[in-house]
Structure formats: structure tokens, C-alpha cells
Image: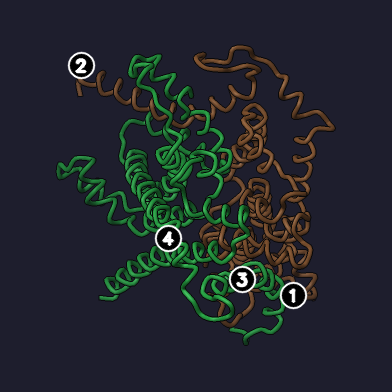
Chain colours: A brown, B green
Amino acid sequence: MTAARALPATLAKIGALALFAFAIFGPLTNLALWSVAERWYTPFKLPVTYGLRYWEVVFRPTGDAMASLMTSVWIALLTVAVSLALAIPAGYALARLKLPLRAAIMILFLLPQAFPSVAIYINVAKLFYQIGLTGTVAGVVLVHAAHGLVYSVWIAAAAFAAVDRDLELAARNMGASPLRTFFTITLPLALPGIIASAIFVFLESLDEFTGTFFVGVPQVSTLPLLLYNASMGGNYQIASITALILLVPSVLFMLFVERFLRADVLSKVGH
Amino acid sequence: MPRPSLFGLLLVAPALALVAALFLWPLGYSLMAAFTLNGEFSLAHFRKAFELYSTDIVFTLLIIGLSTLLIALLSIAIAGILTLSETGWLVAVLKQLYRWPLFIPFIVAGQCMRTFLAKNGMMNNTLVSLGVLDPSMTTSFLDWRGIVITFVWKQAPFVILMLAGAMASIDRSTIEAGRNLGASRLRCLIEIVLPQVGQTLLVALVLSFVTMLSVLSVPMMVAGSQPTMLTVDMAFRINAYGDYPTANALGVVSYGITAIVAWVYLRHNLRQHEAQAR
């Protein structure tokens, strides 16, 4: 290709990339601008006055936002604990032991993710109302754990399946009990995959809106609910700052996801 | 092979119990509530649901169908460029760009778009500043278009990720052969690459379709007015009237839509298996 023909082609590529970058980052930039806009109204294209007043409101130790952040993190940690307590034994059994209807069991864990969730959550809320779990942290944690079970169980099963059986056999041959073999050989080797699943579940819980919307109201207010209420109330600054807080872990995870999930584990997910 | 393990079942039981209590039970309850009136089988709730919300059912199908179509076209184009482009810097930059919305929650995407797509939002402002648009011609995109744009923005990266992964693992020599015979890159993409990754594309699109069908926050935040999506109608029936039967009838409609998509996927899968068996 001659230089005279290459130049327009290169310019077209740069133009298309710029357009694409605007489509990806434009909405995020708009969000970031709102978070530091103290006053912004029509017809001004950019905020009239900038400032960190609303950040101070959000991060005030006694404010709603800090309380929501604490609730969100607390719920996410409890969800991780519940999912791991359920997923480690289940994942091990699915990877190593012979189970009847194994494929059906695997699919069953997927279904809560693959079904239209609103129709399920309204009935969960009704059930929880009868037993006094609506508006409690425990209720929200259970809903989040059920929703995240497909990640925790499938990834844990894949992580256990990727552990070399010969190492376990060697430990057993040297006289280690099955339990000791599990805790000193199998679990440590599967740990990177299990940590990856824990991060997945943590993020899913942190970002979850629909289930909390039906089960958690009115007492449990997480960050996504705060964001929604602020946005619907027209308080775009608070909504944008809350959204930015939720963005940080999501973007970090996007940048590092490949380090957490090794290819040999990934290739076994869902098998 | 060891015998079927009772111990194994014991290990899976707690996790299965959670799914049974928080998924199977509510699912059964929603079917029962939708199909019974005073303890007897009845379609009355469906009649009411269709009377009130038939527009929204069609609207939901059109929105998600259009979003899926646009996601498919965009993903094929971008994954195709990532695989076939000979311009190294273009591929490198594109690879870094497209993934950003991947793990961004729907509710955050909704808030972004609520400001970006507004009449006085950044999209219109930028178009006006560049002279593409006259200030008097700007309109708010916060209606069905907003929902479609948000869905495509949020879900396309996921489909691109899966599709580009599948394209990277196909045999390069088939592409080289096509190129050497003088086929254009577009033709290589359509006739050589796409047929080999069709399965992955279908799986990714089915997953996206079902995900979009479940989203409540985006239609509530991006388009407040009528017509709207089924998820919003269900929440409204519950929160405003405590009307579980009609909400559950709408829920069953959304199961039905999911079932159709699952059927399309399974049928395609079956045909693939038959073709391989032959």
C-alpha cells in the first residue's frame, strides 16, 4: 500500500476508534462530571460550579451513604461466607465423588441465574414476609447467596477438578488421613480458583439491586438502593458518587480477572 | 469408578437446599398463583395481564430482540476486527477499550445513561459542539432508545469477549488459505470465521437475552414512562396493589419467553450434534 492511500485509511481508523472511545467513556465521563458538579443546569454544557461538597456529604461518617456502604460490604462478606460454606463441600463432591444425576445438579445451580429473576423475587419476598425475614440482613444474604451459587459452585468444582489426583494419592500413601489430605493438599491447590469465585460472589452481592429491592426494603438499604433512590429523587450528585463507588471494584476486577482465573480452571468450568 | 456416593450427596445437600428454598419453591408458588383462582384452575389472571399489559409484552420482546440483534452485529464486527485486522495498534487499542463496561452493574450503567442521553446530556452537547446537530434539534433519548443503548453498551463487551476468545482459538490456516486465494477480510469473516464460532455466539446471545429480560433497574431509571418492560410492570403490581396473581401471570409470560429462547438454543444444539454424527 502506498503512503498516499494509507493515510486516509489510518485517519478513518483513528476516527472510528475515537467514536468508539466516546461511546464507551462518554457515559462514564458524564457520571464523573456530575459527581463534582455543585451546580449544573440548562443551557450550560459543563457544570456551572465545581466542588467536593457532595463527596463530603456522602463520606460524612454519620450520613446515609456511609451507613449504606457499611451495610453493603457487610452483606457481601456474609454472602461470601455462606456461599463458600455451601460451595466448597458441593464443589468437591461434584468434582471428585460419583453423584447420581450429576448433570442435573449442575444445571439446578445455574437456573436461578438463567430465569427471569423478578418473578422469583416477588415470591421469595412473600415467603420471607411470612417468616419475618423481609427487611433483614439475613434475608438479603440468603437471596444473594442463592443467586451467586452458580459462580461459587461451578468455579469451586472446576478448581477441585484441576487439582492433580496423584498428589492426593501420594499423601494418602504416606499415611495422611482423607481429611488431612483435603486440608493440606487439595484445598490449598484449589484455593486460587476458590478465591476467584469468592471475588465474583462478593461483587455480585455488592452490585445486586433487584433482590434487595424486593426483600430488603424498607430497613436494609444497600448502595445500589441508595443510588436508585437518589437518582429517582433527582439528586444526581449523590447518585453519581454512589455509582462511582460501585464502579471501583468492578473496573479493578475487569482489569485483573485473567490473573485470578487460570486457563486450566476456566476450561473446566461447567463440566 | 467408585460407587454412587452417599457422602457426596450429603456434601451437596446444603447447597441444593438453598436452591430449593429460594428458587424451586418460589417458582412453584408463582406458577400456582398465576394459574389458580379461589383454589381452582383458571386463566383469569392471564386475561387480566393481557388486557392491561399486552402492549408492554410486545414492547419487551421488541426492545430485547432489537438489543440482541444490535449486540450480535456489533460483536461480530469488533471481534472480527480483533481477529482479522492487520493493523497492530488498532487491535491493541480496541482490546483495551471494549472491555470497560463488562463488570459495571446495570444500575450504574442506568445512572450513566440517565445523564448521558438526556436532552441536555453529554451526547447531545458534544454533537452540538461538533456542529453535527442544531441545538433546536436535540431530543432526549430517555425512552425505548435509551433502554436499547444501555443494554447494548452493557452487554456487548460480554459477547465480544466470548466471541473474540472463540475466534482466537480457531485454526488460523483456514483464514490464511482464504486470504491467499484473494478473499477480502469481510468475506473471510462471514464465510470462514463465523461458521466456526456460531455456537459460542449463540450461547453468548442467549445468556444476554435472558439477562436483559431480568433487569429491573435499567427500564425504571432510563425510561420512566409508558410503555415499559414486564419487570417494571411486575414490580408495580406488587408495590402499588399487592396484586400477586397478575404479577405472577406476567412472570409466567417471562418464563415463556425464556423457554422459547432455550428451545431455539437446544434445537440448534441438537442439529449440530446430528450434523456431527453424520
Which is nearer the eye, A122 or B274?
A: A122
- Give the residue type that dot 1 points to: Arg
State the residue lying farthest toward the bottom: B3
Asked if the residue at tag 3 contacts the one at tag 1, i.e. Cβ–Cβ closer than 8 Å, the answer is no
Camera-near label (1 vs 2) is 2
In this rendering, the answer to whether B272 lies above or below A63 is below
Q: Quadrant of residue B91?
A: top left
Which is nearer the eye, A247 or A164?
A: A247
Which residue carries the number 2 mark? A4
- Give the residue type that dot 2 points to: Ala
Disc 2: CA contacts within 10 A as few (<14), some (14-19) or many (>=20): few
- The tag on residue B51 is 4
Cα–Cα span, label 1 and label 3: 18 Å
Q: Numbered disc 3: what chain?
A: A
Asked if the residue at tag 4 contacts the one at tag 2, i.e. Cβ–Cβ closer than 8 Å, the answer is no
Q: Are marks 2 and 3 on the same chain?
A: yes
Camera-near label (4 vs 1) is 4
Could you tell me residue A270's position as x and y percent? 53, 64
Could you tell me residue B69's position as x and y percent? 34, 48
Q: Which comes before the other along the chain, label 2 or label 3?
A: 2
Asked if the residue at tag 3 contacts the one at tag 4, i.e. Cβ–Cβ closer than 8 Å, the answer is no
Q: Are marks 1 and 2 on the same chain?
A: yes
Asked if the residue at tag 3 contacts the one at tag 2, i.e. Cβ–Cβ closer than 8 Å, the answer is no
Which is nearer the eye, B34 or A8?
A: B34
Which residue carries the number 3 mark? A95
- Give the residue type that dot 3 points to: Ala
Q: Numbered disc 4: what chain?
A: B
Quarter of the image containing the N terminus of chain A? top left
Q: Are marks 2 and 4 on the same chain?
A: no
Camera-near label (4 vs 3) is 4
Camera-near label (2 vs 4) is 4
- The tag on residue A172 is 1
